[in-house]
Amino acid sequence: MATDMGMTNKQFQGFIRLALELINKALTKSPDNEDLQKLKDIFQSMLEDGN
């Protein structure tokens, strides 16, 4: 049984922007971390897809 979280597009985009901010902060500390870079790319594409 699936439950609808009821998150609006604006709330979702806010969550993605917050996550991207934290990922970018982590990348400044570990710029060579390929996993963080891949995660950033995924989140960035999610944000772009939502526009």
Image (cartoon, rainbow, N blue to C red):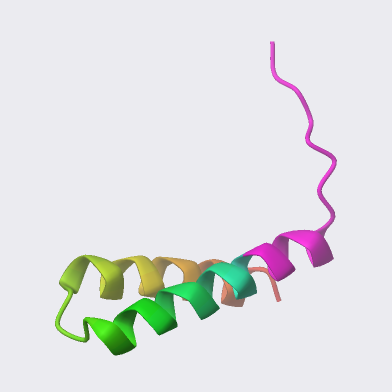
Q: Quadrant of the N terminus?
A: top right
Please state the horizontal and vertical placement of residue 43, each as a whole percent of the image: 48, 68
Q: Quadrant of the C terminus?
A: bottom right
Q: Residue at x 72, y 60 (%)?
A: 12
The answer to which quarter of the image holds residue 34 is bottom left
Number of marks: 0
Q: Is residue 8 magenta?
A: yes
The answer to which quarter of the image holds residue 13 is bottom right
Between 48 and 20, the one lying in front of the other is: 20
In this picture, residue 31 sits left or right of residue 5: left
Between 30 and 1, the one lying in front of the other is: 30
Between 14 and 9, the one lying in front of the other is: 14
Q: Residue at x 79, y 30 (%)?
A: 4
In this picture, residue 42 sits left or right of residue 31: right
Please state the horizontal and vertical placement of residue 6, each as a whole percent of the image: 85, 40
| In the image, residue 7 above or below residue 31 | above
| In the image, residue 2 above or below residue 43 | above
State the residue lying farthest toward the front.
29
Q: Residue at x 59, y 77 (%)?
A: 48
In this picture, residue 45 sits left or right of residue 5: left
Q: Is residue 3 magenta?
A: yes
Please state the horizontal and vertical placement of residue 9, each as a whole percent of the image: 80, 61
The region drawn magenta spans 1-15
Q: Residue at x 35, y 66 (%)?
A: 39
